[in-house]
Image (tube, rainbow, N blue to C red):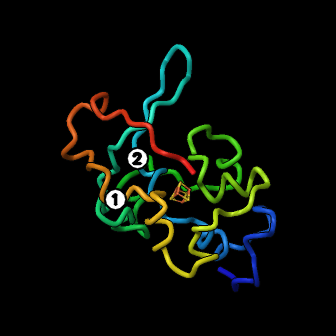
């Protein structure tokens, strides 16, 4: 995986090793929520419906290591994907760094814990419902406060 270099999050995404790439995630959980795409316009609507593997109270994946086996369409975030997909939230650490922006001041790499992220309202923990319980996704469209 590689060692974590001092202030590695300042480096370009392409320069990160596997361990640094994993650490960059803020754990907000927003990429684990279903989105709806308008067939005509391509517009993306956000929802509060979570992948069934997401722990809705902590916004953490319940089986990160085996998630691809359990949820085959779970996307492994890569540099190419970060640059291509339109739905990563504004606050997403990968999106921010891909756009040349710094991490938000609440990011765990700057504060040492996820407390500030939760206090800032950047995590979906406790604010989402599992796809197993949600019913029609169209009933769950929300606009997440980003940033
Ligand atoms: S949206 Fe970005 S920062 Fe948030 S959990 Fe997903 S990959 Fe990590």
Query: In the rendering, which numbered label is found on residue 26?
Result: none
Do the CB atoms of the residues marked 2 and 1 lie less than 8 Å apart?
yes
Mark 2 or 1, nearer chain start: 2
Q: Is residue 101 above or below residue 16?
A: above
Q: Secondary structure at mark 1?
A: strand
Q: Position of residue 144 (x, y in %)?
A: 45, 43
Q: Residue furthest top?
A: 40
Q: Position of residue 18 (x, y in %)?
A: 66, 72
Q: Label 2: few (<14), some or many (≥20) within 10 Å?
A: many
Apparent side of residue 70 relative to residue 101 in the rendered image (left or right): left
Apparent side of residue 62 relative to residue 13 in the rendered image (left or right): left
Q: Label 1: few (<14), some or many (≥20) within 10 Å?
A: many
Apparent side of residue 116 relative to residue 3 in the rendered image (left or right): left
Q: Which residue is drawn at the image coordinates 65% and 79% (left, top)? A: 1
Viewer-proximal residue among 146 and 70: 146
Q: Is residue 103 above or below residue 99?
A: below
Q: Which quadrant of the structure image shows residue 34?
A: top left
- Real-space Cα distance between discs 2 and 1? 9 Å
Q: Which residue is drawn at the image coordinates 54% and 47% (left, top)? A: 146
Q: Position of residue 4 (x, y in %)?
A: 69, 83
Q: Residue furthest front?
A: 119
Query: In the rendering, which numbered label is found on residue 33?
Result: 2
Quickly name the residue at label 1: 54
Q: Is residue 83 above or below residue 93?
A: above
Q: Position of residue 147 (x, y in %)?
A: 57, 51
Q: Which residue is drawn at the image coordinates 56% and 40% (left, top)? A: 87
Q: Is residue 3 above or below residue 61?
A: below
Q: Which residue is drawn at the image coordinates 57% and 46% (left, top)? A: 88
Q: Secondary structure at mark 2?
A: strand
């Amino acid at each position: 995986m590689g060692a974590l270099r001092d202030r590695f999050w300042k480096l370009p995404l392409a320069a990160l090793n596997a361990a640094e790439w994993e650490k960059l995630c803020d754990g907000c959980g927003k990429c684990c929520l279903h989105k709806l795409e308008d067939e005509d316009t391509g517009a993306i609507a956000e929802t509060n419906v979570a992948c069934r593997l997401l722990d809705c109270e902590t916004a953490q994946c319940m089986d990160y290591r085996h998630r691809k086996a359990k949820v085959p369409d779970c996307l492994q975030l890569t540099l190419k994907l970060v640059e291509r997909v339109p739905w990563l939230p504004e606050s997403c650490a990968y999106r921010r760094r891909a756009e040349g922006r710094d991490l938000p001041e609440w990011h765990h790499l700057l504060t040492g814990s996820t407390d500030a992220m939760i206090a800032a309202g950047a995590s979906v923990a406790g604010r989402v419902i599992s796809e197993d319980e949600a019913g029609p996704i169209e009933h769950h469209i929300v606009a997440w406060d980003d940033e």
